[in-house]
Amino acid sequence: MGADLPDYYFRIRENGATVFRVDTENRQRRIEMDQIAVVNVNKGEVKPHGDRTLSEEDVAAIQDWLNKRVALLAQRNIDDILRAVDYMNTTTQWVQSKATDDELEEVTDDLLLAMHDLRTVLVRKKADRLLKDDKD
């Protein structure tokens, strides 16, 4: 490992991360990771580990990571949706050019219901936005 290790390590969890302070300044020159907190990204909560008190530096580093993580997750959500649009297009091409009658029989109702549901929500949300814009 390189000599320039970060001061903090964030072990990603389902809803956030476990935060460790990284220490290489010990007699054995070993990397030690001391758990200092747990972060919940969904709630924006930071809980110190045990009876620990976080320093201003700890809080600043955790908040910086949290801000970057929220932005990354938001971008990933948009990327996932754009991939879904691509997948819908390839599905349309498959239906038009390759699907057999049996394959279509297997998927048509599920696809139609999912597309109807999506369309209904999109139209309602767009109408809400248009009404809001008219009021502003």
Image (cartoon, rainbow, N blue to C red):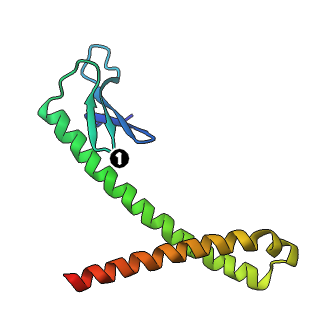
Tell me if residue 32 comes above or below residue 41 in the rendering.
above
Above or below, comparing residue 30 to residue 68 in the picture: above
Residue 26 position in % (x across, y down): 26, 17
Q: Residue at x 21, y 82 (%)?
A: 135
Residue in the foreground of this view, choosing between 33 and 59: 59
Q: Position of residue 73 (x, y in %)?
A: 39, 55
Please give left or right for residue 64 compared with residue 69 in the image: left
Residue type at numbered disc 1: Asn
Does the image show residue 51? yes
Q: Judge the density around disc 1: few (<14), some (14-19), many (≥20) Cα neighbours within 10 Å.
A: few
Residue linked to disc 1:
42
In-front residue for pair 58/93: 93
Indicate the position of residue 88 as horizontal and vertical percent values: 61, 75
Q: Nearer the viewer, residue 29 or 124?
A: 124
Q: Give the answer, above or below, for where 54 lies relative to 79.
A: above
**Secondary structure beneath disc 1?**
loop
Q: Which residue is found at the position 26% from the left and 36% from the top? A: 46
In this rendering, position of residue 8 left or right of residue 83: left
Q: Where on the picture, by quarter, is residue 59? A: top left
- Residue at position x 38%, y 81% in the image: 127
Identify the residue at image location x=24%, y=86%: 134
Point out residue 31 in the picture as x, y percentages from the top left corner. 34, 24
